[in-house]
Image (spheres, rainbow, N blue to C red):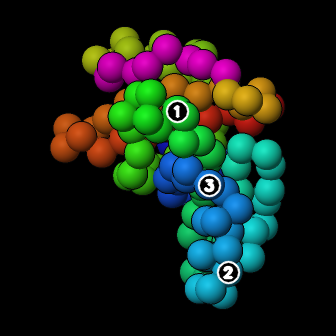
Amino acid sequence: MAKVVSDSWVMGPSKNIKKSVAFYAKLGLKPSMRMPFYVEFKIPGGTALGLHSMGEKIEKKKGRGGGFGIMLRVKGIEKLAVGLKRKGIRCSPVRTAPGGAKFSSFSDPDGNRLTLIQMA
């Protein structure tokens, strides 16, 4: 799989992107990428921090929130997800996010979430 990963970053959910951007600005970080449902900050040392909008309604409805995951930007996500399933790794179905990015998630043996994402 390493040959198909183009880059990676840490991503977490946000109930309110505007408030989150203001919070990270207090830490001296400015968005390097902004979309309606996503914002990304480049952190010195090469790490990227992404926040995706969960919205308050979604969080309350599904009882979700909190927690970060490792994001792996890939090409050919459908083929890659099928290959991982053949190796015994349980991936979620490939879904399309607002904005057109495709993603599929899975966990390591300790329950840490990894997400494959193919940008639109």
Q: Are marks 2 and 3 in contact (CB under 8 Å)?
A: no
- Quadrant the C terminus occupies: top right
Point out residue 22 in the picture as x, y percentages from the top left corner: 67, 74
Considering depth in this image, is 21 or 11 the residue closer to the camera? 21
Q: Amino acid at mark 1?
A: Ile
Mark 1: secondary structure = helix
Q: Quadrant of residue 19?
A: bottom right
Which is more foreground, mark 2 or mark 3?
A: 3
Quote the CA–CA distance across marks 3 and 1.
12 Å
Compared to residue 43, the image places residue 59 above or below, namely above
Of callouts 2 and 3, the N-terminal one: 3
Q: Which residues are magenta?
A: 89-96
Alpha carbon separation for disc pair 1 and 2: 25 Å
Secondary structure, mark 3, is loop
Report x, y in % for residue 40: 69, 60
Residue 16: mark in rendering: 3
Query: Can you tell which of label 1 and label 2 is closer to the viewer?
Result: 1
Q: Is residue 95 magenta?
A: yes
The residue positioned 59% from the left and 41% from the top of the image is 55
Query: Amino acid under label 3?
Result: Asn
The residue where tag 2 is placed is 25
